[in-house]
Amino acid sequence: MRVIGYRYQRTLSAPAVVTGVGFVTGARVEIRFQPAAVDAGICFRRVDLAGTPTVPAHLDCVSGTQRRTTLGAPPATITLVEHVLASLAGLRIDNCTVELDAAEPPGLDGSAGEFVSALCRAGVINQPARRAVLAVDSPIVVRAPGSTLALHPIEGRELRVSYRLDYGLNAPIPPQTHTVSVCPASFIHDLACCRTFLTQSEAQTLRAQGVGQHLSASDLLVFGARGPIDNALRFADEPARHKILDLIGDLALCGFDIAGHVVAYRSGHALNVELARTLAAEAAESSSHQIVQPSSRLSALQAA
């Protein structure tokens, strides 16, 4: 990978708070987004634990990718972080301390909508440091059985994402594809409100495992034989859009901006994180070894 440009780092103008119930535990949760200094990155803080341990949103801290992304080691773990990370990345908020009084953020309606609304109300400011935008000269591809995820080079500094969702023949969720050029405006309008989804059989399996027993089908998108149960789609391709939202959150673990066209076929958190690790390794091996650094030549930078 190579650096093709820079932009200003950004943080919040003021704290933002969201409360709700966790999807996994059903516990009442408060999440507080705090402004942070330049080069601080995104860091989670468990304020409910002794010593308020912190867990950086970094690839080295990923401890689980089964159905959701988990950071940290017990007892200081935080699970289902992808919607929070997507909200921050989608709005280009680079430096933020995320305080939690539980092991997961509020589940809300299964989307990032309420997080994004709270962050927008708080406001975002530029900071006197730069953040690199990296691109590839040739495709980087990672694969798993039945799934593919790739970053392709394109002209300019745009991040474009295409997702192809396909559960197979006679599945309750129809095949669908969505493509979006990711920027704060498109994230807010096209992705933030798109919800977590699963099939009725998947929901029954999770409930049997003790996950989400407090939830009903109307609390998120559960697809039965005739479509969403006790719910309605916000977009015809809402599941594919939500997969892009998750992908943006997982790729944020790289710690730098990515330019190019991400093309995903049936990828999930495990493959998303694998691509992020591959890109981070490529960046570390390139001549652009300083991914995020202060800059004294602010006039030469391009604002977000």
Image: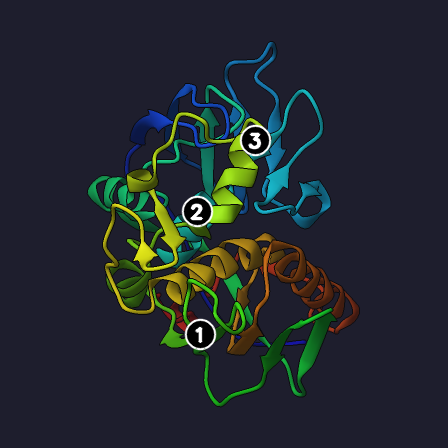
Sequence-wise, the earlier of marks 2 and 3 is 2
Image quadrant assignment for residue 210: top right
Residue 242 vs residue 14: left or right?
right
Q: Mark 2 — residue?
A: 83
| Tag shown at residue 186 | none
Residue 173 drawn at (x, y percent): 42, 64
Residue 107 drawn at (x, y percent): 39, 35
Mark whose residue sits in front, 1 or 2: 1
* Whether residue 63 can be seen here: yes
| Tag shown at residue 175 | 1
Sequence-wise, the earlier of marks 3 and 1 is 1
Q: Residue at x 46, y 31 (%)?
A: 212
Q: Amino acid at mark 3?
A: Ala
Mark whose residue sits in front, 2 or 3: 3
Q: Amino acid at mark 1?
A: Pro
Residue 15 vs residue 169: left or right?
left
